[in-house]
Amino acid sequence: MSVTSHKHKAELASGLKKIYNSDDEEGALLASQEFCKRWYLSEPKAVDILKHNLQATWTYFRFKRDDWHKIRTNNILEREFREVRRRINVMDSSFNDTDSASRYAASTFSYLNQNYPSSSKGLHTHA
């Protein structure tokens, strides 16, 4: 969506939802082909990005449909990234250079990797 023109964003989002709300991988493939045919002239960058990354984003089709809502998005992870960015922005003047900010982010993610709660019923497990 970041490479599309503003006037097409809503329509593109609708097309993407059709792809990812398909019942199976075959339906998603057909919807993605329709999407690419519709947008390849007016939004070529978006179509190229979609084609390049498409099937890597369909892993959830390999699981039971009841589990899709748990694995289709990574909102928990995105929330943690947002929090680290927020903390870095607040402390921006405290860092000597970009390396110190990177070290801070790496230490925060390392802590989260070691201490993030998992559920015995969910899909998340600790190694």
Image: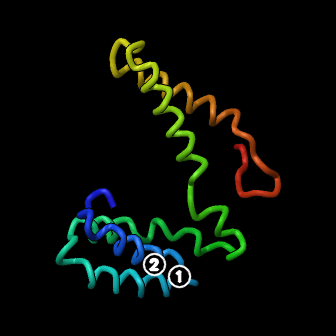
Between the C-alphas of marks 1 and 2, the distance is 6 Å
Residue 12: image location, x then y, percent: 34, 72
Which amino acid type is marked by label 2?
Ile
Label total for image: 2
Res. 3 image quadrant: bottom left
Which percent across, then down, holds residue 29? 43, 83
Point 50% across, 74% down: residue: 20
Query: Does residue 103 sit above or below 79 in this rendering?
Result: above
Q: In this image, 17 relative to 66: left or right?
A: left
Residue drawn at the location 70% of the way across and 52% of the way down? 124
Q: What residue is shown at x 69% (from left), y 75% (from top)?
A: 64
- Label 1 Cα crowd, 10 Å radius (few <14 / some 14-19 / many 20+): some
Decide which of 9, 41 is in the foreground and name it: 9
Mark drawn on residue 10: none
Apparent side of residue 120 relative to residue 69 in the rendered image (left or right) = right
Quadrant in the picture for residue 11 = bottom left
Q: Tag 2: Cα neighbours inside 10 Å, few (<14), some, or many (≥20)?
A: many
- The quadrant the N terminus occupies is bottom left
In the image: residue 126, left or right of residue 101: right
Farthest residue, direction left: 41
- Disc on res. 22: 1
Query: Considering the image in quadrants, where does the C terminus appear?
Result: top right
Q: Residue at x 53, y 77 (%)?
A: 21
Residue type at numbered disc 1: Ser
Tell me the SS state at disc 1. Answer: loop
Return the x and y of residue 122 as percentages of the image width and height: 76, 57
Residue closer to the observer: 69 or 93: 93
Tell me the residue that label 2 is attached to: 19
**CB-based contact (under 8 Å), mark 1 and mark 2:** yes
Colour scheme employed for the rendering of this structure: rainbow
Is residue 59 or residue 5 the one in the foreground?
A: 5
